[in-house]
Image (cartoon, rainbow, N blue to C red):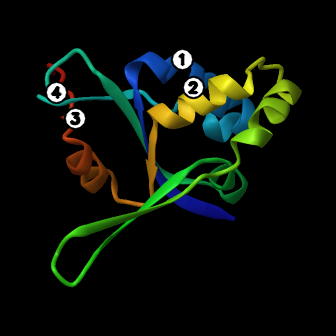
Amino acid sequence: MTTDRCIIIPASAQAKAQALCAGLAGPAGAGMFITGLSASGNAPATHYISAGPISSDMAALLPCKSVTTDAQGNQQITMTPGHPELVPALADKAGITVTRAQIDALYAAIDVSDQEPFAAMARLGLKLVQVPL
């Protein structure tokens, strides 16, 4: 079973997030966070995005923002914390050494939502980095 998620990470977390996703999700987690984002749409990328279906087990580990609009048109954000306490042991089984403090810092830095990618990017003030053809 899968769940759609949009995950936006700061560029400084790219290598760690890529390793964790590949280690915890296997081949399905490889190749994530290669699309760059920035406030201007110009390089260098300040953030990276991956969006689409992920396993429901992986989704349950991650924090998630659900964004709805109230009757006045204001965005309302509710947050579920995920299960950061489970990640170090799961990572260890995949041969990745990570502490709970590192996972807490990563979770504090990333934005995981159930929004469509362009809506999440707009909420964060980010655009796709344009690369020359």
Crowd class of label 4 (few under 14; some 14 to 19; many from 20; radius 10 Å): some
Alpha-carbon distance for marks 3 and 2?
Answer: 19 Å
Residue 42 in the figure: left or right of residue 60: left
Name the quarter where the N terminus is drawn: bottom right
What is the quadrant of residue 26 in the picture?
Answer: top right
* Residue with the most extreme right position: 93
Q: Tag 2 or tag 4, which sits nearer the N-term?
A: 2
Query: In what element is the residue under mark 3?
Result: strand
**Mark 3 and mark 4 residues within 8 Å of each other at the beta carbon:** yes
Q: Is residue 10 above or below residue 74?
A: above
Q: Label 3 belongs to which residue?
A: 128
Q: Label 2 belongs to which residue?
A: 18
Q: Tag 2 or tag 3, which sits nearer the N-term?
A: 2
Q: What's the amino acid at mark 3?
A: Leu
Crowd class of label 2 (few under 14; some 14 to 19; many from 20; radius 10 Å): some
Alpha-carbon distance for marks 3 and 4?
Answer: 6 Å
The front one of 90 and 105 is 105
Q: Which mark is residue 130?
A: 4
